[in-house]
Amino acid sequence: MSTLDADTVDRLAAHLEEAELKAREVEKITDEYPDLDFEDAYAIQWAIRRRKERAGHRVAGLKMGLTSWAKMAQMGVEQPIYAHLFDYFAVNEGAPLRTDELIHPKVEAEIGVVLSRDLSGPGCTIAEVMAAVDVVLPCVEVIDSRYRDFRFDLVSVIADNASSARFVTGGVGRSPDGLDLKGLGVVLEKNGQVVATGAGAAVLGHPLSSVAMLADMLAERGETIPAGTFVMTGGITAAIAAQKGDHFTVRYQDLGGISLRFA
Amino acid sequence: MSMDAKRRQTLAEELYRALRDAAPVDPISERHPEMGIDDAYDISGRFLQLRMDNDGERVIGRKIGITAKAVQRMLDVDQPDYGWLTDAMWVPHGAAITIAGTMIAPRVEGEIAFVLADDLAGPGVSEADVLAATDFVAPCFEIVDSRIRDWKIRITDTIADNASCGMFMIGPRAVSPFDLDLSTCGMVFELNGEITATGAGAAALGASPLTTVAWLANAFGARGESLKAGEVILSGSLVPLQPVKVGDVARIHVGGLGDLSIRFA
C-alpha cells in the first residue's frame, strides 16, 4: 500500500541519488516519512534506476541484501531485499577503488552468478536457478549507505538502493555443476590479516536460493531476471569497514580469489 | 612451577571427580591465583593419568583449543592450548550423547580432524610437514565441557581441565589433505535445522588447520615429545561454540568433506 505520491517518490529518488553522487551522507528518509512502506521504498529505488538510465547508465546487475534467515527474523521480515548495480559501480580487479567517491565504504565477500536464460517467479526454485546459471564466480561488494553512520531501517535502505556502491568480480568462474555452493568456504583478509570467514550457506542456506527469491520478488512487479544478468547473491561475511590505503583479499574454496585496494 | 606437586595432584583429583560425577568445581585460578601455565599442564597430565590408572583409558590423540583469534583475545592469550583424547571420549558415528550424568554444560564445536600416518616431531614442524605426515582429514565434532562451574575459565583453568575436552565424533568420509585447500574449506554449522554459523579453515589461527597442528607438534617438540602415527588430532573449532541441551541435533557440512550430525539425549 503506497503512501507517497509520484512527485514525492521522484523527489526522494533525486535526493538519495544526489547523496550517492556527491558522497554526502543524509538522514534516513523515514525521519521525514515515518509511514514509508516497502512499496514506496522500491518505488524510490526504481525511480533511481530510471534516473540512471536517463543519464545514459546501464544496469550491470542485481544484488541481494539481508540474505540471512537470522537477520530477517531480527528485522521481522520474511524476504530479503534486492537492489540495482549500475555500470559505473564495477571496478576491475587490480584497479584502485576511489575512496573519495564514497562516504564510509564497507567490504563484503559474496558469490555471484551470471544467468544463461530468463528466470521468473513466483515459485522459482533452486532447481530452476541451477539449470539457468551459466557461471558462478567470486565477487566483492563495497556497500556505502548514504545514511549517516549506517543508521537506517529496512525501508530507508531499500530506497537507498540497498547501500550499493561498487563491486569487483574476478577469480575463477565455474559451472554450478558439481560445485558445493553451501559448503564453499570464503576467507576475507584486510591488510594481510584474516578478518572474517564463512561459507556459502550463510546466504539463505544456499546462495542460489537467493536468486530464486529475487525472481519471486521481481515477479511481484511483473518483472523477470533476464538472461545474461549478473546477480550478487548476498554477503557471506560480515561487512568490514574500509579506508583509504586499505587492501582486501578474498579467497574462495575452488573459485580462486579477488583483491582490491582503496586509493 | 609455582605450585607444589601435592597441590597439583589434589587439583587433578578434584577435576577427575568433577568429570566422573558430572559436578563442576569452582574456578581453580580464583582459589589458586599462583597457578601458572606449566602448573596447569602438569595438572592436566595428572588428570589424564588418573583416567588411565583408574579406568583403563588410553590416549588415542590430542586436541588443540583456543585457535580462534576472538577466543584468544577473550582469554587474553596469544597462543592455543592442548588436551588429550582417550578412547573413552570417542563417540561412534551415529550414536547419541546422553548428557545427564555424563556432561555438565556441553558445547559443540565443528572441526577438522587429522589422522597421522607418521610421527611429527618438533621443533621446526611446518605446515608442509603436517601435510606430508597426515594420512587423512575428516569432519568432526568436539563436544567440549568445562568441569569449572559456569565455564568461568581463565586460560590456566581450561588447560588444567584437559582443554575443556569432553567427547568427539569423527565423520565417515576421509579425504587426503592433498585434495583439499584446508585454508578456504568452508564449515556450515546447523542446530536443529537452523544455520547458526559458517566459517572456513582460516578461522584456525587466521591461517589454516595445518598451522594449528604444526603448532601442536612444536609445542610437544619443545619438551622432547612427538605426535604419533595413528593419532587423531582435533585441529580447533572453525565456528563459535554452540551450547546444546537434551533433544538438540547439531550438524556440520564441510566443503569437500561432507556432513556429520550428532544428537543429544
Image: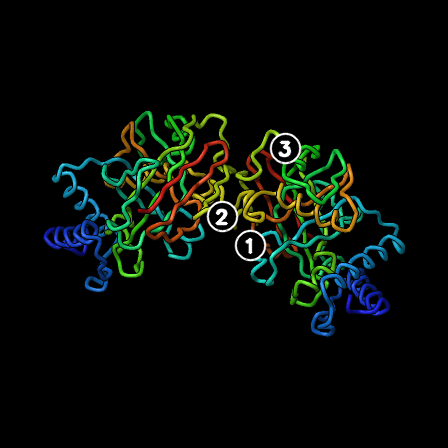
The chain ID associated with circle 2 is A
Q: Residue A50: x and y, percent?
A: 15, 41
Residue B259 sits in which quadrant? top right
Callout 3 secondary element:
helix
Q: Residue at label 2?
A: A194
Asked whether the beta carbons under mark 2 and mark 1 sit within 8 Å of each other, the answer is yes
Amino acid of disc 1:
Lys
Tell me the residue that label 1 is attached to: B69
Q: Badge 3 sits on which subunit? A: B
Residue type beneath disc 2: Val
Counting from the top left corner in percent of width and height, residue B164 is at: 70, 57
Q: CA distance from mark 3 to mark 1?
A: 24 Å
Q: From this viewpoint, which residue is outermost toward the bottom?
A: B31
Image: A147 above or below B174: below
The 10 Å Cα crowd at callout 2, few under 14, some 14 to 19, many 20 or more, is many
B163 to the left or right of A101: right
Q: Amino acid at mark 3?
A: Pro
Q: CA distance from mark 2 to mark 3?
A: 22 Å
Cα distance between the residues tagged 2 and 1: 10 Å
On the question of residue A73 being in view, the answer is yes
User: Looking at the image, can residue B190 be seen?
Assistant: no
Tell me, for residue B37, which label it has, or none.
Answer: none
Residue A167 picture quarter: top left
Q: What residue sits right under mark 3 in the picture?
A: B177
- Asked where in the image residue B106 lies, by quadrant, the reply is bottom right
Residue density around tag 1, few if under 14, some if 14–19, many if 20 or more, within 10 Å: some
B253 in relation to B108, above or below = above
Image coords of residue A169 (percent x, y): 35, 35
The outermost residue toward the front is: B124
Q: Are marks 2 and 3 on the same chain?
A: no
Q: Are marks 2 and 3 in contact (CB under 8 Å)?
A: no
The residue closer to the viewer here, B24 or B220, is B220
